[in-house]
Image (spheres, rainbow, N blue to C red):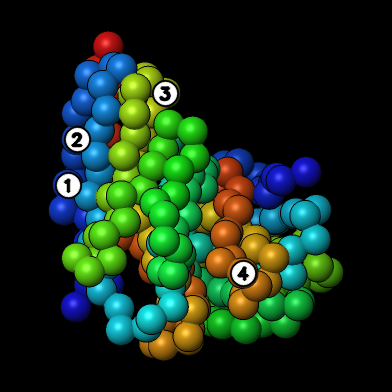
């Protein structure tokens, strides 16, 4: 199983809503990542988890709150978002942050629209 | 300074022809990896090919090959026998192994949008 799954595929939310994005992998990977991608731009790294611990937070606003409940699951909790947060949110996983060449496998993404 | 440069915002290629997508990089780390990802309009980033800085031979994966010229710091992707399904955005990325400023994370170029014409 070389798949990273993400739910939901699409999400529309108001600025006062609270929602969560979910990411799952069953490859035994110990590093998981959240990226944000605006249209026609490359992905921007948001968070990195290594062995279920937050390893990197790229100065992301606190309205984005990551959570790694176990080695297979990664959540991104959203609260009080702004319209400019509308983007494609990609989850990725790799064997480990410093294992081999660290190929990252990406999920299909969640397209988020904030009204 | 940009670490990964993709100078072609858009490219067209005729079906069944070969196409080269350019990528140059900048690093002082002697140990690094170079990656190419494909992103169709559906959004998923699909890993295509990898080249390590110490690899002596150019990487190949099916119709994809990486033309690695270390002295020139270039890692161009060659797609042979283009297919309509190859139409997508292509990103070149680098990972510096010895920490550096990028902390070992993937650094992406701005991408090249490839359109394959029937």
Label 1 crowd (10 A; few <14 / some 14-19 / many >=20): some
Q: Are marks 4 and 1 in contact (CB under 8 Å)?
A: no
**Chain label for disc 4:** A
Frontmost of labels 3 and 4 is 4
Whether residue A33 is visible: no
Whether residue A25 is visible: yes
Alpha carbon separation for disc pair 3 and 4 = 30 Å
For residue B46, which numbered disc appears in the image? none
Question: In the figure, residue A48 lies in which quadrant?
Answer: bottom right
Which type of secondary structure does the marked residue at label 4 adopt?
loop
Label 4 crowd (10 A; few <14 / some 14-19 / many >=20): few
**Chain label for disc 3:** B
Work out whether residue A100 or residue A36 is closer to the camera in this orientation and state it.
A100
Work out whether residue A91 or residue A100 is closer to the camera in this orientation and state it.
A100
- Residue annotated with mark 4: A100
Q: Are marks 3 and 4 on the same chain?
A: no
Label 3 crowd (10 A; few <14 / some 14-19 / many >=20): few
**Chain label for disc 1:** B
- Residue annotated with mark 2: B11
Frontmost of labels 2 and 4 is 4
Q: Position of residue B34 (x, y in %)?
A: 41, 62
- Residue annotated with mark 3: B85
Q: Position of residue B11 (x, y in %)?
A: 19, 35
**Chain label for disc 2:** B
Pick whichever of labels 2 and 3 is earlier in the sequence. 2
Q: Position of residue B113 (x, y in %)?
A: 27, 39
Frontmost of labels 4 and 1 is 4
Specify the farthest residue to the left.
Answer: B7
- Placement of A93 over or under A108, stated as above or below: below
Identity of the residue drawn at 68% across and 49% down: A4
Q: Does B91 sit left or right of A88 as displayed?
A: left
- Residue annotated with mark 1: B8
């Amino acid at each position: 199983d070389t798949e990273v799954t993400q739910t939901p595929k699409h999400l529309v939310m108001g600025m006062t809503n609270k929602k969560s994005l979910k990411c799952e992998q069953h490859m035994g990977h110990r590093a998981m990542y959240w990226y944000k991608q605006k249209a026609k731009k490359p992905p921007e790294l948001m968070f990195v988890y290594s062995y279920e611990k937050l390893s990197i937070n790229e100065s992301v606003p606190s309205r984005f709150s990551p959570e790694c409940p176990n080695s297979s699951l990664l959540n991104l909790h959203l609260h009080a978002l702004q319209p400019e947060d509308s983007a494609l949110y990609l989850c990725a996983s790799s064997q480990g942050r410093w294992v081999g060449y660290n190929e990252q496998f990406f999920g299909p993404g969640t397209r988020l629209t904030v009204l | 300074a940009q670490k990964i440069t993709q100078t072609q915002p858009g490219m067209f290629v005729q079906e069944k022809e070969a196409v080269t997508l350019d990528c140059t990089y900048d690093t002082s780390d002697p140990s690094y990896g170079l990656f190419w990802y494909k992103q169709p309009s559906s959004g998923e980033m699909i890993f295509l090919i990898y080249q390590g800085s110490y690899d002596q031979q150019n990487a190949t994966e099916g119709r994809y090959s990486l033309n690695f010229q270390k002295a020139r710091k270039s890692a161009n992707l060659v797609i042979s026998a283009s297919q309509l399904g190859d139409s997508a955005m292509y990103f070149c990325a680098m990972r510096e192994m010895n920490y550096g400023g990028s902390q070992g994370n993937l650094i992406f170029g701005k991408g090249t949008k490839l359109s394959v014409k029937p």
